[in-house]
Image: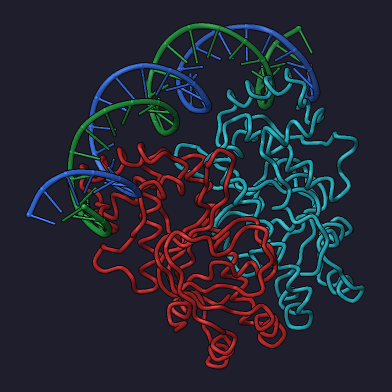
Chain colours: A cyan, B red, C green, D blue
DNA sequence: CGCGGACTTGATGTCCCTCAAGCCGCGTGG
DNA sequence: CCACGCGGCTTGAGGGACATCAAGTCCGCG
């Protein structure tokens, strides 16, 4: 059930058997959500955190006139709102992009972990810091990269993150979201995303269609994006 | 010494006398840095976290060709790299913008806090989550707001954050940084920042010169920026 | 078979960038 | 005391990347 979370954690640190058990015991219900549903609205008090088991979710903030900025994409194994454990009410909303299966972790049980498992607590803390690292890298994209680099970077990031949880197969991974949603991630319009995707396709770098990404030339893509995966902390070491 | 940090924390939660003492005891050296110096280079292992006592600092990431994105500004009372406690090597650098005085918190002492003060640990965790909230709001600015809204938002945010630590005086606060640095925060060029500042000045909304910001019409500024301070969690409540 | 959502493409517009020059204030040194 | 240099600010002219508006086209699905 929490195997992808454990893969994600163990890519970064050792997790003992007792800690693994504590995590399993902290979980409560499994829930299924349909696609395109806001499951955690901004400002609402939360009493549990949500681990994404299957599907894709997104954090987003709305502006007036229907504008929206997606601030992070979530893949299986991600705690989409572990930070709600300390924030309670979130500053942003979280929605499903595809049908999703999630697992709930009641906050009182997480609090119990912080009382009895300091090291596991630090690993959980680390996971929320990792989200902040991703936020910063997106800020670089949004503030300084041009459209083609932004998209290249996004596809490189997802490649790296999905690989950790075993969801990449030979440069291919599922990404069943629309071009408009990609645009909302990278501060562009869907029209421009469409044109840039065409450019990437015609350059033989990557294909993104019918919800699947096929990367043909990862090194070239990483070069265009100035992608360096250090910010994802994929080298295992003690925290 | 750590009074501004305590002001910042107590704007969000109760901090007990024992917790305050634990924090004081966890501090080690005070250090002074000159302006414009990178004090925490990206990728270098850190063994302590840095509390900013006085001055302004910035987190930034470099790109090729001298481009740079500042991902957060830090004001007195901010832990500029509390996240280095769990990340160790940072994904970004931290520099001084002005002469700064800082206070070091060795990581082993922070680890001791996580072993003995679960609630204080959660408050520290909260502080790193607060940085992530600020990152997300900046992502909205960078991705979706136009130049005038971006600057308006930045000045509103700094107003709110400086007020918490008592550094706002009747709509005025010190901000001794250059227009080029403002540009690096908000993904613009210094030329354009200059033009937009002129626009804000001529509209009677705010003045930013010789390192000082004077806000003349905060409500109007907040309206332009679509600034809502909820993401700063300034209402005191239990974590 | 027809509908609707997503994708595609063209024409036009605009916000911000780039390049360039000049100005202003201030510290330094002759 | 003034010349000078320098960093930061200011302003203009021109250009480009991306947005906007507007038609389609494609395709899965009822």
Q: Quadrant of residue B3?
A: bottom left
Q: Could you tell whether B134 is left or right of A226 in the image? A: left
Where, by quadrant of the figure, is residue A126 drawn? bottom right
Residue at the spot 60% in from the left edge and 27% down from the top edge: A190
Q: Position of residue B51 (x, y in %)?
A: 52, 74
Q: Is residue C19 above or below residue B235?
A: above
Residue C15 position within the rendered picture, expressed as x and y whole percent measured from the top left: 39, 31
User: Where is residue B107 drawn, in percent x and y?
Assistant: 66, 77
Tell me which residue sits at (66%, 69%) in the image.
B46
In this view, the residue in front, A39 or B76, is B76
Left or right, B228 with respect to B71, comes to left
Q: How many marks?
A: 0
Image location (x, y in percent) of residue A209:
77, 25
Whether residue B9 is visible: no
- Depth check, front residue: D30 or A26: A26
Q: Nearer the viewer, residue B59 or A188?
A: B59
- The image quarter containing residue A132 is bottom right
Spot the residue most to the right: A17
Q: Tell me: residue A33, above or below residue A186.
A: below
Is residue A185 at least partly visible in the picture? yes
Specify the quadrant that holds the N terminus of chain A. bottom right
Location of the C terminus of chain A (image quadrant): bottom right
Quick one: B43 or B223, which is closer to the camera? B43
Give the residue displayed 47% in from the left and 45% down from the top. B141
């Amino acid at each position: 059930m929490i195997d992808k979370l454990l893969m994600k954690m163990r890519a970064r640190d050792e997790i003992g058997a007792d800690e693994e058990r504590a995590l399993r015991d902290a979980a409560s219900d499994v829930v299924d959500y349909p696609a395109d549903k806001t499951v955690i609205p901004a400002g609402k008090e939360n009493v549990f955190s949500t681990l994404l088991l299957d599907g894709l979710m997104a954090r987003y903030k709305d502006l007036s006139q229907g504008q929206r900025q997606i601030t992070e994409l979530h893949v299986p194994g991600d705690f989409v709102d572990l930070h709600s454990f300390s924030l309670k009410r979130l500053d942003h909303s979280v929605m499903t992009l595809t049908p999703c299966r999630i697992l709930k972790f009641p906050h009182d049980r997480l609090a119990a972990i912080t009382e009895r498992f300091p090291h596991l607590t630090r690993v959980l803390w680390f996971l929320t810091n990792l989200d902040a690292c991703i936020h910063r890298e997106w800020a670089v994209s949004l503030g300084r990269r041009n459209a083609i680099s932004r998209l290249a970077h996004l596809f490189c990031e997802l490649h790296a993150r999905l690989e950790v949880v075993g969801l990449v197969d030979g440069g291919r991974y599922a990404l069943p979201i629309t071009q408009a949603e990609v645009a909302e991630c990278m501060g562009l319009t869907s029209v421009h995303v469409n044109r840039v995707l065409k450019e990437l396709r015609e350059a033989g770098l990557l294909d993104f269609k019918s919800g699947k990404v096929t990367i043909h030339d990862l090194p070239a893509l990483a070069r265009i994006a100035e992608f360096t995966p250090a910010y994802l902390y994929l080298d295992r070491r003690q925290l």
